[in-house]
Amino acid sequence: MTGDELQKLLEPTIERLGYELTDLEMRLSGKGGLLRLTIDKADGIDLDDCGKVSQAVSALLDVEDPVPGNYNLEVSSPGLDRKLTKMEHFQRFMGETLKISMRFPIEGRRRFRGTLMSSDEENIVVEVDGESHSLPLSMIDTARLVPDGA
């Protein structure tokens, strides 16, 4: 099962509990692997929230058995340097500073650090040192918030 397929399986359960699945990381190997879920909600995430989601997702994974082999399930909050993975994330954090890595060079560079100025369904615009750069969402490898003062 791919990460996208697994996300589609898990999202309804997580959303019914009142959370958003913001990221899913799957690293499976021979004797042990890792399935890491990052969740969020409007007023933040605490340990009890992670426990609730972990318990519900564990039960679902036991029944559906979509992931082969042994793995550890981790559920965590996005943290201060959260990943932006969905269009809604870019829209929510307009005006914030981002650190972006591209899959391929754009305008001769792969890394950008600047202020998120706008976004649409296909691109985001980041201002770096007074210059605007339009970056296709499909070519972004990772985009993270830069915490204040970092």
Image: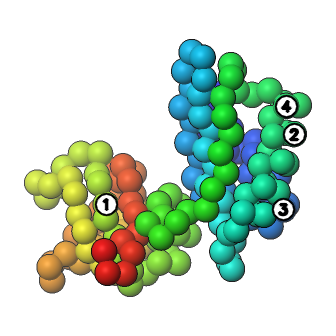
Asked if the residue at tag 2 contacts the one at tag 3, i.e. Cβ–Cβ closer than 8 Å, the answer is no
Asked if the residue at tag 2 contacts the one at tag 4, i.e. Cβ–Cβ closer than 8 Å, the answer is yes
Residue position marked by numbered label 4 in the rendering: 62
For residue 17, which numbered disc appears in the image? 3
Q: Position of residue 57 (x, y in %)?
A: 80, 45
Residue position marked by numbered label 1 in the rendering: 100
Residue position marked by numbered label 2 in the rendering: 59
- SS at badge 2: helix
Give the mark nearer the N terminus: 1 vs 4.
4
Give the mark nearer the N terminus: 4 vs 3.
3
The residue positioned 82% from the left and 52% from the top of the image is 13
Q: Is residue 100 visible?
A: yes
Amino acid type at image mark 1: Ile
Give the mark nearer the N terminus: 1 vs 2.
2
For the residues labelled 1 and 4, the Cα–Cα distance comes to 36 Å
Residue 135 falls left or right of residue 63:
left
